[in-house]
Amino acid sequence: MKVLETYQNYYFVGIGGIGMSALARYFNASGKKVLGYDKTNTKLTQQLMSEGIDIVFEDVIDDKITSLQAENTLVIYTPAIKKLGILDYLNQNQFEVLKRAKVLGLITENTDCIAVAGTHGKTTTSTLVAHLCKEADLPFSCFLGGISENFKSNFLYNGAQYSVVEADEYDRSFLTLSPDWAVVTSTDADHLDIYGDKNTIEEGFKQFAALVPNDRQLFVRKGLDIGREHQTYAVNEKADYYSDNLRMDHDKIYFDFHTPSETVKDFVWDIPGIHNVENATAALAILHNLGVNFETLKKAIANFKGIKRRYTKHIYPNGKIYIDDYAHHPTEINAVVSSVKTFYPDKKLLIVFQPHLFSRTRDFADGFAESLSKADELILLDIYPARELQENFEGITSGWLLEKVNLDKKEKSDLSGAFEKIKEKDFDILLTVGAGNIDTLYDPICEWINSSVQSKM
C-alpha cells in the first residue's frame, strides 16, 4: 500500500457513520478530495456536505465513481455495510480498499496515541480527554464517537503530536490501533454477534490493553481484570486515581480528585451522574500524567458542555425536563435512569426507547426489561435494524420485548407515530433513548415543549 497521505482522493463507503465522518473530516482538513456514499441523509451528512464533502445517497455507478483512478484513490469502508454495488465496482477495478479501523490505526502510528476503550463510557471519556487537551492547548487531533458540544464536531485538529481516539471494540477494530496511552472503562458483554460470549469479549480487551507499551500509561477502572499491570481509577473508593465527596448544588456536581500523592478539592461541572464523574476521573488521570496543571484542568472541567445525545438535558420554565441519550445497552440505560431517579426522585418519568439491533435485543432482553421497568410509563419503538435483517431473527420484535417489561403503563409504537403519542402523555421528565434514528424526534419535541411553555406565559 502507498503511504496514506500520498493519495489525492478518499472515497468513504458509509460516510455518515460517526467514526467514518471523523476520518472524512481529517482528510478534508488535510486538503484532500473527499467524497462518499451513505444510504441516509442525516444532520451529520448535511454538515459534511456544508464542509465541502461530496456525498451521494443512491447506490449508483455514476460519473463521480467512474472518473476516479485507482492509483490516486483510497477507498475506506465500514464493515456495517454488507453489500453495495459501489463497493463491488471499486473492488473489481483494483482500488485500494481498507477498513475504517485500519486507516485510523495507520494515523495513530505516527502520533502519541491516547485510546479510550470500553463497552460503556468511551465516548464521554475520549471527548473529555480531547476537551482537556484543547483547553490545555496541547498539539493534538481527535477522532470521536460523538459530537462534542464544545467544538460541535467529532473531529478537531490542533496539532499532530497526540491523537485522541475512541477505540471501538466492534469487529475487534481497536486491535488495529497503536496506543501509547489507554483507558479501559468497562468490559461488559456486548456485540455478541462478533464475540459470541462474555469471556471472548473480555479477552479482546486484554489484547487491546497488551498493545500499550508502559504499565503506567494504562488506566483501567478498578475491579476489571485486564491481564497485566496497570493504574486504576474509581469513584467513591480508593484507587491510584479516584474521586469522592460527590454532591449537587444548584444543578452543578462537585467532587474531589485524588492522585497517588495529592488531593484536589472542588472540581465542579454541569454533567450529572456518578458514571460521568468516573469518566472524568479517567480523563483527569491522563492529563495529569501529561503534565497539565490542576488550575487548567479545573477550568476545563467547569466549561465542559458534554456530548450531543449523552444526557442532553433541557429544563423548562413550566418544570418539565427533557433528556435525550444514546444509551442502547441495559447497563447504559440503568446509568441514565439511576441519575434521573437520584436527582429527581419524585418526578413522573416517561421513557421512549428504540432498541438497536435484533441481536442485541435478543441477547439482553431480560436486562432491557428490568431497566425499562423503572419508568413510570414506557413507549417502546420498533427495533432499529442497522446492519441486520428481521428475517434472520424470527420472533425478536419490540412486541416480544414489551411483554417482558413489568409495567402497567406501556405501549408499542413505530417511529412515525411516536411524537403524537408523546404529546398525549402526562409526564414531568421525558427521556428518549436509543442509538438508531430516534434522534429525529429531538427537534420536534424541543419545539413542542417550547411552544407549550410560550403559549402559557
Image (cartoon, rainbow, N blue to C red):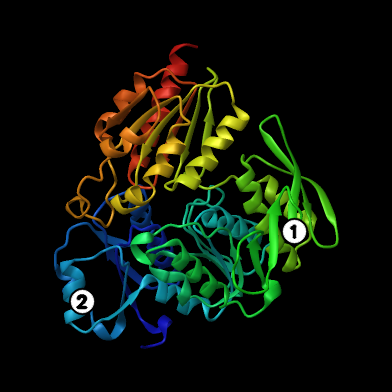
Q: Residues within 10 Å of mark 1 (few under 14, many from 20)?
A: some
**Amino acid type shown at disc 2:** Leu
From the viewer's perspective, is 297 left or right of 121?
right
Q: Which mark is residue 239?
A: 1
Q: Residue at x 51, y 22 (%)?
A: 320
Residue 83 in the image: state x and y as whole percent: 19, 66
Residues at marks 2 and 1, CA–CA distance in whole angstroms: 51 Å
Q: Residue at x 63, y 74 (%)?
A: 228
Label 2 vs label 1, nearer the camera: 1
The answer to whether residue 304 shows anywhere in this view is: no
Residue 297 versus residue 26 in the image, above or below: above
Q: Residues within 10 Å of mark 2 (few under 14, many from 20)?
A: many
Dots 2 and 1: beta carbons under 8 Å? no
Q: Which mark is residue 90?
A: 2
Q: Residue at x 50, y 12 (%)?
A: 457
From the viewer's perspective, is 62 left or right of 178?
left
Q: Quadrant of residue 372?
A: top left
Residue 323 in the image: state x and y as whole percent: 49, 34
Q: Depth check: 122 or 54 in front?
A: 122
Query: If the image is split into quadrants, where does the N terminus sit?
Result: bottom left
